[in-house]
Image: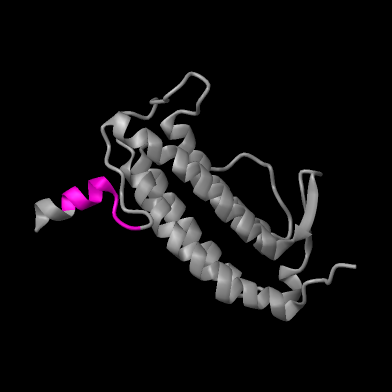
Amino acid sequence: MAKRLTAEQAIFLLQDMYMPMLKAEHRMTKAVLEAVPADKPDFRPDSNAKTAMELVRHIAASENRFLETTINGEFSAAPAAFPESAKTPADFAAWYAERFEKNCEALTKLSGDQLLRMVDFRGMFQRPAVTFLQIGLNHSIHHRGQLTTYLRPMGGKVPAIYGESYDSALAKKAAG
């Protein structure tokens, strides 16, 4: 029989594993969202692909949705409520960052028992709330990768993610 996660283990996962990863990945994701050229929101590499702006909105909303799943102990499939003022990729990146900070603050206040609440994901599986942080990270990293492949064809620059990118190295060289 499989062992159950304890409250102490859930706190360890949150504080020592997920929070540092969330914060590191957030900085990179925000940089990618900000790198999307504002004049190319409808760019898509294929007619079956999401547009750049659809990906920007999806990443910004879904990453926070997974954080809120852990906070609230339930997954909500309700459409994201974006501010009416958000029009450009930079606007959505700012909204994403503000909401992320509030959600991170709320995460740090959760008890081990709250982190262990079983959460149903669309009737497909049930997992402890804390594990939705890793699911959210994987989801966000996947879509961020998609969006980075759009940047150069749109005339944008790929920011440094896990080390320098070609574009960030060129910018560094030009500045130095």
Residue 163 quadrant: bottom left
Does residue 39 lie above or below 16 as drawn? above
Q: Position of residue 84 (x, y in %)?
A: 45, 39
Does residue 124 lie above or below 66 as drawn? above
Q: Position of residue 77 (x, y in %)?
A: 68, 42
Q: Main secondary structure of the magenta part?
A: helix
Q: Position of residue 57 (x, y in %)?
A: 48, 40
On the question of residue 20 being in view, the answer is yes
> How does the figure colour the protein chain or chains?
one colour
Relative placement, left or right, of 40 versus 117 is: left
Residue 7 quadrant: bottom right
Q: Is residue 105 magenta?
A: no
Residue lying at the far top of the rendered structure: 47
Q: Residue at x 50, y 44 (%)?
A: 59
Q: Position of residue 158 (x, y in %)?
A: 31, 44
Residue 4 quadrant: bottom right
The stretch in magenta equals: 163-171
Of the 4 image quadrants, the one containing the N terminus is bottom right
Q: Residue at x 13, y 54 (%)?
A: 173
